[in-house]
Image (cartoon, rainbow, N blue to C red):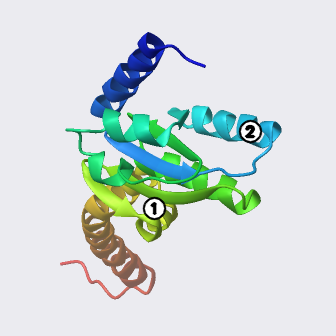
Amino acid sequence: MKRKEDKKKDLEALRAELEKAPSIIIGSYEKMKVAQDFALRKTVREVGGHYKVVKNNIAALASQGTPSEPALKDLKGMTSVAYTHEDPVALAKALAKFAKENPLYSFRAGVVEGRVINMADVKALAEMPSKEELFSRLLYLINAPATMLARTLNGVGRNLAVVVDQGVKEEKFKSA
């Protein structure tokens, strides 16, 4: 059994992480085997996230005064917290993929950029395109009008050159 000082250190460490993390996903992992838990931790680490199994009362106390407080109060059962300082979509995708392969893991709620989201929102977040894909789509949309204008202007000159060439070949132009 942990000593009171150790519990206090755990509480303060979790509070510091919750205050810094803009994106948190709370899950339930009942009846998962050690190998599955290890795979889940590895999956979260691969996308730049962190994963902790937390006691419900410590999570509720640590979240007081943070944006994650509504999501972490009144928890029941086995609870885990996955958080990231980077891309919340990547974390949600990784957890959704893991949950699909391991039905013992499920979402409870989450916090993204200070806003509490429910299970359906976490799943919707997982279906969003990645940050890189969104940037590439945005760049395509910005670049598309300029590309179309260049093609159009290029087409006019090319068409004029074809007409002049045809006229010369058919001797339609007379010299003065």
Please report the residue visible at 35 percent of the width from the left and 53 percent of the height from the top: 71
Identify the image quadrant of residue 151. bottom left
Q: Residues within 10 Å of mark 2 (few under 14, many from 20)?
A: few
Type of amino acid at the residue the image marks with label 2: Ala
Q: Are marks 1 and 2 in contact (CB under 8 Å)?
A: no
Please report the residue visible at 61 percent of the width from the left and 34 percent of the height from the top: 46
Taking depth in this image into account, of 112 and 46 the one nearest to the observer is 112
Image disc number at residue 15? none
In which quadrant of the rendered image does the N terminus lie? top right
Query: Is residue 12 visible from the viewing direction of this image?
Result: yes
Residue 17 image offset from top left, x and y in percent:
36, 27
Identify the image quadrant of residue 60. top left
In which quadrant of the rendered image does the C terminus lie? bottom left
Taking depth in this image into account, of 127 and 82 the one nearest to the observer is 82
Residue 74 image offset from top left, x and y in percent:
39, 54
Label 1 residue SS: helix
Identify the image quadrant of residue 109. bottom left
Residue that mark 1 sits on: 122
N-terminal of the pair, mark 1 or mark 2, is: 2
Q: Is residue 18 left or right of residue 56?
A: left
Type of amino acid at the residue the image marks with label 1: Val
Taking depth in this image into account, of 138 and 80 the one nearest to the observer is 80
Please report the residue visible at 39 percent of the width from the left and 77 percent of the height from the top: 162
Residue 18 image offset from top left, x and y in percent:
34, 33
Number of numbered callouts drawn: 2
Please report the residue visible at 75 percent of the width from the left and 51 percent of the height from the top: 31
Q: Is residue 119 above or below residue 93?
A: below
Query: Is residue 132 visible from the viewing direction of this image?
Result: no
Residue 30 image offset from top left, x and y in percent:
68, 52
Residue that mark 2 sits on: 39
Q: CA distance from mark 1 to mark 2?
A: 20 Å
Q: Is residue 32 above or below residue 34?
A: below
